[in-house]
Image (cartoon, helix red, strand yellow):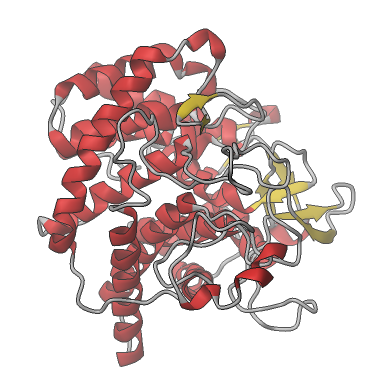
Amino acid sequence: MIAIDANVSAPDLVPGLESLWGVAGRCIGALRRRWNEADGTPVFTEAGRYTTRGWTEWTQGFQYGCALLLFEATGDEEYLEYGRRETVTKMAPHLTHLGVHDHGFNNVSTYGNLLRMMSEGTIPEDEWQRSFYELALKLSGAAQASRWTSLPGGLGYVCSFNGRHSLFSDTIRSMRSLALAHQLGHVLMGEQDERISLLGRLFAHAETTGRYNVYFGEGRDAYDVRGRVVHESIFNVDSGAYRCPSTQQGYSPFTTWTRGLAWILAGYPEQLEWLETLCDADVRSSGFSADSLAEIRSRYLEIARAVADFFIEYTPTDGVPYWDTGAPGLVHLCDYLERPADPFNEYEPVDSSAAAIGAQGLLRLGRYLARNAGSKSDEQAATRYTQAGLSVARTLLAEPYLSLADGHEGILLHTVYHRPNGWDFVASGQTVPNGESAMWGDYHLMELGLMVKRLAEGGAPQRFFDTGRTT
């Protein structure tokens, strides 16, 4: 269980943030100088050097997004120019990629960050640049929403790259692309000029994910533990019937792959923030079946709190989870939840990227509850989640997770990609992957670092929907 430090504060983490910016500058520069773009997109490191791994093209936006966030943190315009140039010249195919569920990763991390920074005044206002970023995000949201599987009762989901039968937990993070496109006044046009509400599809996807990919301790199956998350749900696409839980990257459908858990934990609090900008009229216009915005907010909060509680309970004391809560080698680690994670153990790898993603969700959930507390218990929970997020961030901003040694191209160490497939590099003398980085881990640590920086300065964390325009 995470040992939550009730006294740690965002200003306490400023020295770690300064280290992070230095590490990021070194790593971004090293990769930029060495990488041959003909080799594809960097995904994860092997012996400290980034390499590619074809599965889906979901990491390029993180590569350039890291540079944009480093500019935002330090004011060094070299990183702005690099991130902006590469976004303009390299990212267009991602906007209309109809074969993936990753638009919230690639496109919001690039075009979305650029539009947000312009709206916040971090970069100068420019009408044509703004229009370009807005058009890109409209295209992305509509393309993502078009990858749709309908279910009975007004439900449905953006299907994973596995096919129309597959709902991934990861995809809740891509609902931000639908939210942005809707916020910018866009709709998806279908056959016979049908106007398809992006907001309606967002609501339906979020409810379907919460209903089938998250457990609430209500006896749904023999492994129904409140807050547990399954990576994938499988549906019969002809009848729309739910068939079974599944997983691609976890150990089993009846254990919890912790990065999938983290995606849920990051996604719903982020959506809760955005829901604060909507009203009941938006719900009615979406075509979704909820009676009111209050009903949707309550549902998202129920999901977010369940997974946050599970994350805290089933993660070691320092806030870094092992890659799956049911990984078979954990039995050899005995009291592993009662001490800090050990990335150098000989049985199972940790996944620091899940910690970086999950910490963001904890911070956002804590702040949301603090703003909307209806009881003393809500206030206590808000403090608990916020302090848990800060406690995890403190761990990641120091060794052995922050990559302080020269010569390594990654920012965040001890991430894993696909343990069941055996893709992750295992160094000589080791029995499990450790010491390596991944593009999503680097990016989400940068995103987490920027959140903490803003809190330390008395501000609020950056939000994907702060674009300066609404419908």
Most foreground residue, 178 or 416: 416
Which residue is painted at 59% across and 46% down in the image?
430
* Residue 106, position as x, y percentages in the image: 47, 32
- Looking at this view, name the residue that lies furthest to the right: 238
Is any part of residue 77 visible from this angle?
Answer: yes
| Direction from residue 67 to residue 101 in the image, left or right | right
Q: Is residue 10 left or right of residue 168?
A: left
At x 44%, y 37%, the residue is 181
Against 322, residue 428 (above or below) is above
**Image spot of residue 116 (x, y percent):** 27, 37
Tell me where residue 403 appears, x and y as whole percent.
34, 41
At horizontal 68% and vertical 61% (from top left) the residue drawn is 230
Residue at the image position 70 percent from the left and 66 percent from the top: 255
Quadrant where the C terminus is found in the figure: top left
Residue closest to the eye, 69 or 441: 441
Q: Is residue 468 above or below residue 296?
A: above
Q: Is residue 464 visible?
A: no
Above or below, 69 against 151 in this view is above
Q: Where is residue 219 in the image (x, y as percent from the top left)?
A: 75, 83
Counting the numbered discs, the total is 0
Q: In the image, 429: left or right of 49?
A: right
Residue that protrudes farthest toward the left in the picture: 457
Q: Residue furthest bottom?
A: 376
Instruction: Work out whether 98 lies above or below 463.
Output: above
**Quadrant in the rendering for residue 327:** bottom right
Closest to the observer, 433 or 58: 433
